[in-house]
Image (cartoon, grey):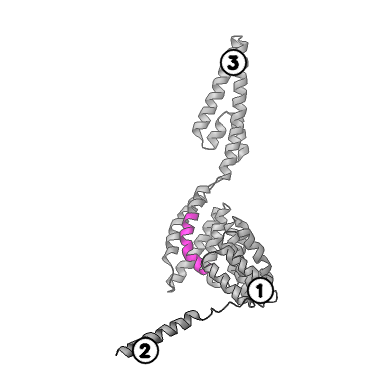
């Protein structure tokens, strides 16, 4: 019994020693797959820039590699995941001329996503519409429609965004009624965003020249036009009070009082005209910002579902 146990122990010892003492197999750096495997490992660890370095080694060392276009695609994808959207577009745009239709399609997707993330909403909306109309894009129509709506909202075209989101909701409801398994996050997203967009599409810009006209006609009325009642009342009071004191100075032949308050009234009058113009411009520039921030917040929560369908 003891000898049998000793035999097993010695056998285990010698086998373990042989395995540990055997020289480790050296990676074959004459093959592109070695670099690609290493790049993929870095990508899995979200170390995107080291992954890019390894992918670029393949391009440099193996210029005749038959799948070189896909290596360029992987580089563009890593740039996207790393948040460098300009580099993503630079890397992927040449691939849109590829003869490989699948490669061309997925490249266009990442370019469209890069446009959106880089706040180039007009380009994003155009490209998502093209993808939506393509044959390969048929499975992703719902997501493309949502992205198009978000891009329209980014351009403050809330009426158009409302139409896109309404279409997306109809698409989602139709699939759900047909028995397809649909993520409930979509329904929650539509319930929150459609009322918000319906309210946002009623927002209208203020013409700064009308603000100038009203302010020149009656001090403070330009701010009343913009809905800034407190500022309008202050402007009216300052200009009106200074004008009254300036006239009083003239009537009393007080040169100091008349000159001082005439200067003040003139400055306040011109200032409130310019202020109403600037306020109108700022109002238009910030129009819909609050609504779009809330839309984006809702969209990011939905994007957990979207990324598995559109990020390939």
Residue at numbered disc 1: 68
State the residue in front, 196 or 6: 6
Q: Quadrant of the N terminus?
A: bottom left
Label 1 secondary element: helix
Q: Position of residue 3 (x, y in %)?
A: 33, 90
The tag earlier along the polypeptide, 2 or 1, is: 2
How would you rate the neighbour count of disc 3 (Cα within 10 Å): few for under 14, some for 14-19, many for 20 or more?
A: some
Query: Is 250 situated above or below 180?
Result: above
The tag earlier along the polypeptide, 3 or 1, is: 1
The residue lying at 33 percent from left, 87 percent from top is 5
Look at the image and say whether residue 298 sits in the magenta stretch.
yes
Look at the image and say whether residue 287 sits in the magenta stretch.
no
- Magenta span: 296-312
Query: Is 6 situated above or below 264?
Result: below
Query: Is 14 situated above or below 39?
Result: below
Disc 2 to disc 1, C-alpha distance? 55 Å
């Amino acid at each position: 019994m003891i000898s049998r146990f000793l035999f097993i122990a010695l056998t285990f010892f010698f086998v373990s020693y042989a395995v540990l003492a055997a020289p480790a197999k050296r990676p074959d750096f004459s093959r592109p797959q070695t670099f690609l495997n290493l790049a993929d490992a870095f990508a899995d660890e979200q170390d995107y820039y080291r992954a890019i370095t390894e992918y670029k080694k393949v391009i440099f060392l193996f210029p005749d590699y038959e799948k070189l276009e896909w290596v360029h695609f992987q580089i563009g994808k890593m740039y996207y995941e790393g948040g460098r959207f300009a580099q993503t577009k630079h890397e992927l745009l040449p691939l849109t001329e590829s003869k490989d239709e699948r490669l061309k399609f997925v490249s266009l997707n990442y370019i469209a996503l890069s446009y959106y993330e880089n706040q180039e909403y007009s380009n994003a909306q155009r490209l998502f519409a093209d993808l939506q109309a393509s044959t390969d894009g048929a499975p992703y129509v719902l997501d493309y429609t949502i992205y198009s709506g978000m891009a329209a909202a980014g351009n403050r075209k809330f009426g158009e965004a409302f139409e896109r989101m309404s279409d997306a909701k109809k698409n989602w409801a139709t699939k759900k009624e047909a028995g397809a398994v649909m993520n409930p996050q979509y329904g929650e997203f539509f319930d929150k965003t459609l009322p918000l967009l319906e309210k946002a599409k009623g927002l209208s810009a203020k013409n700064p020249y009308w603000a100038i006209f009203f302010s020149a006609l009656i001090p403070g009325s330009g701010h009343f036009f913009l809905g800034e009642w407190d500022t309008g009342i202050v402007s009216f009071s300052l200009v009106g009070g200074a004008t009254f004191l300036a006239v009083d100075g003239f009537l009393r032949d007080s040169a100091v009082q008349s000159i001082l308050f005439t200067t003040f009234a003139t400055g306040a009058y011109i200032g409130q005209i310019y202020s109403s113009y600037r306020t109108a411009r700022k109002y238009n520039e910030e129009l819909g910002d609050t609504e779009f921030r809330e839309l984006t917040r809702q969209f990011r929560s939905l994007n957990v579902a979207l990324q598995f369908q559109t990020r390939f």
